[in-house]
Amino acid sequence: MERVSLTIDQVERVYWLFRAPDLAINSATPLLIALHGTGGTALWANDEAGWSAFAATAGYHLAIPEGRTIIPDRPPKFLTNPQRWNDGATRPGDPLHSDVDDVKFLDAVIDDAIERVGCDSRRIFLTGFSNGAGMAFRY
């Protein structure tokens, strides 16, 4: 998998891109986007759920974005500074609340993946686990 860095609102955001094997860069291959849950990471979610193995078997390209930490200037920690998605479920004052624009980030992930691997823009699928599922619903 390739680590891809994007700048969204002057902030570096990351996603991991898996290219379907043996497919041309400009093929009409579908794109699957998988979102981890609160406290998870893209690579952990891939290992746990087997997303890249599924994508290889199904002939999909795969993007697994990283959520943002609650305290952006500190490293992620599962309990005290988890990575998560702004799925709209929290409000200011909630310890897990963030104002980060994850819809904008996912738009950028889709645009970038289409440009990099030439996937079919009409066949983009989004799924997630827990907080990632909430973000998929919001998107």
Image: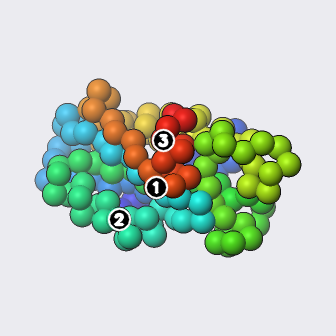
- Looking at the rendering, which quadrant does residue 91 occupy? top right
Q: Position of residue 137 (x, y in %)?
A: 49, 38
Q: Nearer the viewer, residue 6 or 62?
A: 62
Alpha-carbon neighbours of circle 2 within 10 Å: few (<14), some, or many (≥20)? Answer: some
Q: Is residue 15 visible?
A: no
Q: Earlier in the sequence, mark 3 or mark 2?
A: 2
Q: Which quadrant: the N terminus?
A: bottom left
Badge 3 amino acid? Ala
Coordinates of residue 39 in the picture (x, y in percent): 60, 65
Chain-order first, disc 1 or disc 2: 2
What residue is pinned by disc 1? 129
Residue type at the position of mark 2? Ala
Secondary-structure class at tag 2: helix
Residue 41: mark in rendering: none
- Specify few, some or many for label 1: CA neighbours under 10 Å numbering under 14, 14-19, or 20 or more: some
Residue that badge 2 annotates: 49
Q: Residue at x 62, y 55 (%)?
A: 84
Q: Position of residue 131 (x, y in %)?
A: 56, 52
Relative image position of residue 34 (x, y in whole percent)? 41, 51
**Residue 69 position by quadrant:** bottom right
Which callout, 1 or 3, points at the residue further toward the start of the chain? Answer: 1
Say what amino acid the circle numbered 1 marks: Phe
- Distance CA(mark 1)–CA(mark 2): 10 Å
Gap in Å between the C-alphas at discs 3 and 2?
17 Å
Q: Are marks 1 and 2 in contact (CB under 8 Å)?
A: yes
Mark 1 lies on a secondary structure that is: loop
Do the residues under discs 3 and 2 have CB atoms within 8 angstroms? Answer: no
| Residue 136 - label | 3
Tell me, yes or no, whether the two marked residues, 1 and 3, touch with CB atoms within 8 Å.
Answer: no
